[in-house]
Image (spheres, rainbow, N blue to C red):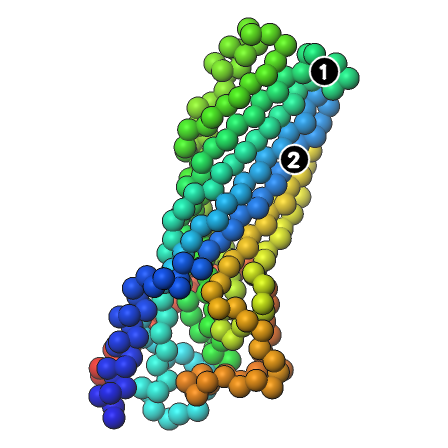
Amino acid sequence: MKDYRIFYLLTILVLTGIPALSQSSYSVEYNHKYSWQAEGMDMEVTVTGEVPFLTGTNYAVIPKCQTGSTSRLDSVKVVSELKGQGEMIARGKAILGDKSDPENLVILDYTLPVKINIKGKTWFKDGTCAEIWNLAIEEDWSGEIKWNYGGPSEGWEALARVMSPSTFGQVSKMEKHTLEFQRYPVFTDKPLVLVEEAFTAMGLPMKGKLVYRVHLPGIHRVGPDEQYDDNQSIQPNKEYTFTDLHWGPPLNQIKWSVVDVEKL
């Protein structure tokens, strides 16, 4: 019996590390918007797109929570690395000058592909054994900017082309925090959303809103009286809270105590 359970756990560890078709439903969606309005300047920037991610290498752990069994083997759970790559599009538009004098307005707009790299980890919360996922995102803004210009003269456009950068050359990393959410149990039938105001403490006429959405496959609503299957130890009760998408710790603070299931 023990040999069968070990084989079952090893099979899960191997198979769930293979990108399955259903995993294509995992994704992070961006919908960021910024604006800068001051005398002589009206600027808007949007960053939109959706990047898929999936589970990678898996490891066996024994979390600090009750499973209803005295066997260490029965207490084993699987944690995973998460990974994904994709591309967002940043779009910017600026109107310079006095809008009461439209013939002399200067208009700039651009598009820029932003490469996204996602890394993450899953883990189990002490006590409740709720499964938590954390995603760190790296943004590469070093792609080539495509500019469009409009101005009162051809000479101005030539000057703008000379002065405009061909790339922002910037790489932004989530080093201090991650996107965190509870994957199991799930009590929602909609994407997980994090909305945050940007530039609030910079003292600039810049305003903005960050909007992240995490899309998960198989999200469904579970009633308070509905039971999970026999393989899931957690039952709905008032001890569990189900927060929306929020900021969590950096990945280097999430530690695993990996076990060898063949030695249990």
Residue 108 picture location, percent across and down: 58, 22
Q: Mark 1 points at which residue?
A: 102
Residue type, label 1 = Pro
Residue type, label 2 = Ser
Tell me the element at label 2. strand
112 shown above or below 187? above
Q: Name the residue under label 2.
A: 35
3 shown above or below 186? below
Which corner quadrant of the image does residue 59 belong to?
bottom left
Tell me the element at label 1. helix
Q: Is residue 45 left or right of residue 89?
A: right
Residue 27 picture location, percent across and down: 46, 56
Q: Which of labels 1 and 2 is toward the front?
A: 1
Residue at 49% x, 38% y: name it: 89
Residue 199 picture location, percent across and down: 63, 41
Residue at 59% x, 58% y: name it: 193
Q: Distance between the residues labelled 1 and 2?
A: 20 Å
Identity of the residue furthest to the right in this view: 100
Which corner quadrant of the image does residue 169 belong to?
top left
